[in-house]
């Protein structure tokens, strides 16, 4: 277990360095004074700053065989039995709704190498720096996305 934690911590630090200073991208930080397993690398994506949605970034990363996923999506209130018992819960949870649309979990663990992380971060940087153009080009393609 200790070996996995060391690998995850190293990946976390590498992502942190590579993603810093990207407007609209905020990596959720661990409190390094606490014991952590660094199991999740989570980004919060502000589409107003990046001009590209979390879902489009996710789709493009998936197309490049990067296994990202929406983090804790949908919110628990959108799943059964809560959805049926409290159909208007989303109206009472605007921050949960907003956050559920903004977060993305990046790959970590023993199946990924540092060089892979660098490539993932380069792609995220490219997508956010060119968000408006990428979003526009994708919107003109035929078919469902």
Image (cartoon, rainbow, N blue to C red):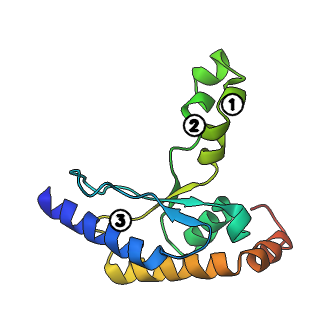
Tag 2 and tag 1, C-beta contact below 8 Å: yes
Which badge, 2 or 1, comes first in the chain's sequence?
2
- The percent position of residue 107, horizontal first and vertical second, equals 41, 65
* Residue 120 appears anywhere in the view: no
Real-space Cα distance between discs 3 and 1?
Answer: 31 Å
Residue beneath the point at 70% across and 81% down: 130
Which class describes the residues within 10 Å of circle 2: few (<14), some (14-19), or many (20+)?
Answer: some
Residue 108: assigned label: 3
Which badge, 2 or 3, comes first in the chain's sequence?
2
Q: 35 or 131: nearer the eye?
A: 35
- The percent position of residue 112, horizontal first and vertical second, equals 33, 72
Real-space Cα distance between discs 2 and 3?
Answer: 23 Å
Q: Is residue 85 above or below residue 9?
A: above
In the figure, residue 18 lies in which quadrant? bottom left
Q: 98 or 66: nearer the eye?
A: 98
* Left or right, residue 137 beside residue 73: right
- Quarter of the image with the C terminus is bottom right
Which badge, 3 or 1, comes first in the chain's sequence?
1
Q: Is residue 16 above or below residue 47?
A: below
Badge 1 is on which residue?
90
Badge 2 is on which residue?
75
Tag 2 and tag 3, C-beta contact below 8 Å: no
Real-space Cα distance between discs 2 and 1?
Answer: 9 Å
Residue beneath the point at 26% across and 58% down: 32
Q: Could you tell me which secondary element the residue under label 3 belongs to?
A: loop
Residue 11: assigned label: none
In the figure, residue 116 lies in which quadrant? bottom left
Q: Could you tell me which secondary element the residue under label 2 belongs to?
A: loop
């Amino acid at each position: 277990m200790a070996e996995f934690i060391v690998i995850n911590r190293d990946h976390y630090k590498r992502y942190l360095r590579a993603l810093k200073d990207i407007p609209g991208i905020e990596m959720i930080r661990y409190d390094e004074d606490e014991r952590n397993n660094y199991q999740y690398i989570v980004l919060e994506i502000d589409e107003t700053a990046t001009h590209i949605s979390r879902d489009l970034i996710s789709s493009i990363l998936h197309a490049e065989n990067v296994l990202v996923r929406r983090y804790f999506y949908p919110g628990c209130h959108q799943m059964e039995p809560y959805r049926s018992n409290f159909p208007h819960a989303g109206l009472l949870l605007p921050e949960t709704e907003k956050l559920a649309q903004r977060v993305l979990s990046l790959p970590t663990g023993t199946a990924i190498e540092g060089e892979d992380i660098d490539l993932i971060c380069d792609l995220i940087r490219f997508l956010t720096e060119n968000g408006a153009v990428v979003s526009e080009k994708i919107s003109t393609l035929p078919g469902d996305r």
